[in-house]
Amino acid sequence: MASENLNIVLAFLKTLENRTSSAELDQFYHPDILQTEYPNTLTKNTANRTFDVLKDAADKGKIVLQKETYEVVNSYEHSNTVIIEAIFRGTLAIPVGNIPVGGEMKAYFAQFYEFKDGKIIKWRNYDCFEPFS
């Protein structure tokens, strides 16, 4: 049986998949949220995003992707932290590398979500993308 925090993460991922604007994600974020994305194929340097920056990044993501899905492979919990392993698939709205518009981008994610007051306060991404060729 999933915990309340795991259910929040799963609902968050479903909202990411189906959102039409970043405002739909606000309900999941603590006002003091800090999201950290460690270097990967798309993000060359560690990126730290606060609430407003995270919302802007979500809006920009909708420009790059026609569709995105998150397949949770495993989940783990410790105290106020939920850890998931997921397979991300994104159908591109613009070409990326050698992947054309309509092509699929695929990555393997490890994500750590920390909670405060029933909201995500810290979120760390370790993203491993398949080659863009």
Image: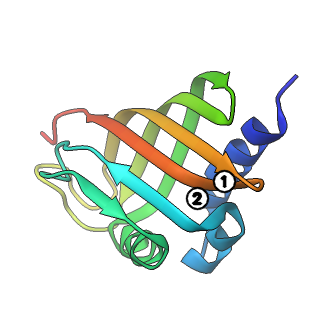
Which residue corresponds to the image point at 41% horizontal and 50% vertical from the top-left?
90
Quadrant for residue 26, please give it: bottom right
Q: Is residue 42 visible?
A: yes
Rendering quarter of residue 71: top right
Number of numbered discs on residues? 2
Query: Mark 1 belongs to which amino acid?
Result: Phe
For label 2, the crowd category at 10 Å Cα-Cα, with few meaning under 14, some 14 to 19 and many 20 or more, is: many
Disc 2 marks a residue whose amino acid type is Leu
Q: In the rendered view, does 66 fall on the left or right side of 47?
A: right
Q: Is residue 51 above or below residue 71?
A: below
Is 45 placed left or right of 121 in the picture?
Answer: left
Q: Quadrant of residue 4?
A: top right
Residue 60: image tag: none
Residue at 56%, 42% in the rendered image: 113
The residue wearing badge 1 is 12
Residue at point 11%, 52% (across, down): 97
Which residue in the structure is indicated by mark 2? Answer: 16
Q: Position of residue 101 (x, y in %)?
A: 27, 62
